[in-house]
Amino acid sequence: MTDIKAPGGAEGTAPRGARTERGARTRTRLLEAAEQVFTELGYHEASIVKVAGAAGVAPGTFYLYFAGKQEIFDELVEDLNRRVRQAMADAASRGRTRTEAERLGFEAFFRFTAEHPGLYRVIRQAEFVSPQALRLHYGRIVAGYVRGLEDAMGRGEIATGDPEVLAWALMRVGEMNGLRWILWGDTDEIPAHVFEETMRFVQRALEARP
């Protein structure tokens, strides 16, 4: 997987304006407000004034933390990516087998999607307003997925194949089912029968063959 550089400051340095506990809290509020505004209005209708207002700070305060709308959008994509990867990794780590890990990871993804519809709406906007951030988002998810699949293949637990191709394919399964039954559906969680059918599909894709 090609290394993709993240936006923002140098690695290991505190983000601008977040060098104190109070500053870190304000920066977090701005990112939460940006998630709300970009999700509801879209990138082009969103504004710094609207983000600042949703965060409960003055517009001038915004510039202590972010250079402009594009920068906070890029960092929001990275923040959503970090949180969904953490949620899936924490859940999957409790699985005793790769199949269990997949089930727990998919559950965590669908739960995060229901709680954060911006994961879809913001990421889809990134295709047009920040392709670099979009590549970062998918690239990081796939990189971790590939490592887990490679380990399972090495143990003979799942079928041997190209782990990157399999990772992209399985990621797409989860993404599209979440889009159809959570974002476009009339419920805030994936229906049980949809989840079980998804897991049967994943199981068939992973089954070791002689």
Image (tube, rainbow, N blue to C red):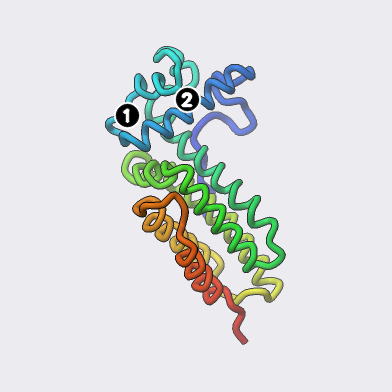
What is the crowding at mark 1: few (fewer than 14 residues within 10 Å), some, or many (at least 20)? some
- The residue lying furthest to the bottom in this view is 210
The amino acid sitting under disc 2 is Leu
The quarter of the picture where the C terminus appears is bottom right
Residue at image location 58% in from the left, 61% down from the top: 146
Element carrying mark 1: loop
Residue occupying the point 48% across, 70% down: 197
Disc 2 and disc 1: Cα gap in Å? 13 Å
For image coordinates 42% across by 41% down, the residue present is 118
Q: Which mark is residue 82?
A: none
Side (left or right) of 127 relative to 93: left
Question: Which of the pair 102/147 is nearer the observer?
Answer: 102
Instruction: Point out the residue furthest to the left here.
Output: 45
* Residue plotted at (64% across, 62% down): 101
- Quarter assignment of residue 104: bottom right
Q: Nearer the viewer, residue 129 or 100?
A: 100
The residue singled out by tag 1 in the image is 46
Q: From this viewpoint, is residue 111 visible?
A: yes
Residue 73 placed where, x, y %?
Answer: 41, 33
Q: Name the element at disc 2.
A: helix
Q: Residue 106 placed where, x, y %?
A: 54, 58
Q: What residue did someone put label 2 on?
A: 30
User: 198 or 63: nearer the eye?
Assistant: 198
At which x and y percent is residue 57?
Answer: 45, 15
Is residue 132 visible in the rendered image? The answer is no
